[in-house]
Amino acid sequence: MRIVSVASAIPEHSSPNGEIEARLGLEPGWIERRTGILRRPTATPEEATSDLAIQAANGVLRNSEIHRRDIGLVLLATSTPDHLLPPTAPLVAHRLGLQAGAIDLVGACSGFIYALVLGSHWADATGKAALVIGANVLTRRVSQSDPATVSLFSDGAGAALVVPSQPTCLLSSCLGSDGSAYDAIGIAAGGSREPLTPESLKSGRNLMTMHRGASLLKQAVHALADAGKMALQQAGMHASEVTWWVPHQANIRIIQDAGALLGIGPDRTVNVVAQYGNSSAATIPTAIADALEHGQLKHDDKILMTAAGAGLVTAGAVLRW
């Protein structure tokens, strides 16, 4: 496979740190010191996940010579679908004018890499292009009174168009999970285990929570680094050969600590968490689109992507750009 186009959709409005810190009685600078985030793009009340996904996808299609009839599959990595049922991807495909298969993938922060790997192999098997999208509206799934989540999560979308190509540009991939950490990050109510009720809404169990703060951060750091090491090993590469590392933009501490374990410094790390926040599955394509816009990524660069998120779901991949 090869990626022929990448684009993002970032909401114009954002919630600055000072606004949140003032509302929650936090010391000025608290959010930036803990997360490295300065602002969180926030969708308008009229915008849903599908709207952001379509904006990003249209950007991809405008920048590509691939005809819409040659796109056979849409994979939407999201944790915030428009509705619990039906999936959102068919609506995205319809509004884009595509006659294609379309499904949602719920892989949390690792969702885009999962979708990219699966879409790549599908494209190779069928000879048709795959549209891979990561999109979320996470600001509606966090409690506005919880500093741990409201300071991190944002809204956005990124998309990539994958076409079959020989030799392949996907040099390796590593997909993993650790269900022992299943309850560390999540939304308790709204699924089959705990249906949504007036009581759960009142208590906020329909919103995201994070537990085991310090241990969770440490676990995320090691998961992010381990996914990268395994992807590099499968590609027969050393970290020194990586041109750019594109990690999931969780927060600055996780990125820095995982980079140290990988042996990849800030000078080779695509880091846009300050301006875009953490939009889960959308962070990696958003980061790639930003790097392309600023001329960082060049032909034949070796790109390492790694992610770790709720579940615990991990992913790593090495691409030749």
Image (cartoon, grey):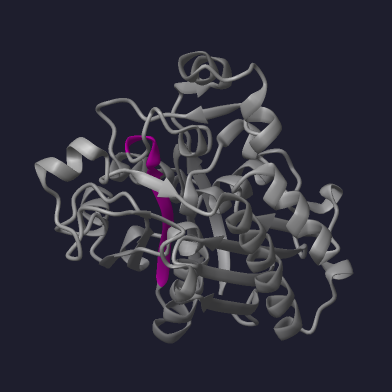
| Residue at 10 percent of width and 41 percent of height | 198
The answer to whether residue 57 of the structure is visible from this angle is no
Task: Give percent across and percent down for residue 230.
Answer: 69, 79
Vertical relation: 177 (above or below) 278: below
| Residue at 43 percent of width and 59 percent of height | 108
Q: Quadrant of residue 102?
A: bottom left
Q: Quadrant of residue 86?
A: bottom left
Tell whether position 7 is magenta: no
Q: Is residue 254 left or right of residue 82?
A: right
- The magenta region covers 129-140
**Closer to the camera, 52 or 178?**
178
Task: Give percent across and percent down for residue 177.
Answer: 50, 75
| Residue at 32 percent of width and 36 percent of height | 140
Vertical relation: 15 (above or below) 259: above
Task: Give percent across and percent down for residue 61.
Answer: 43, 50
Vertical relation: 284 (above or below) 261: above
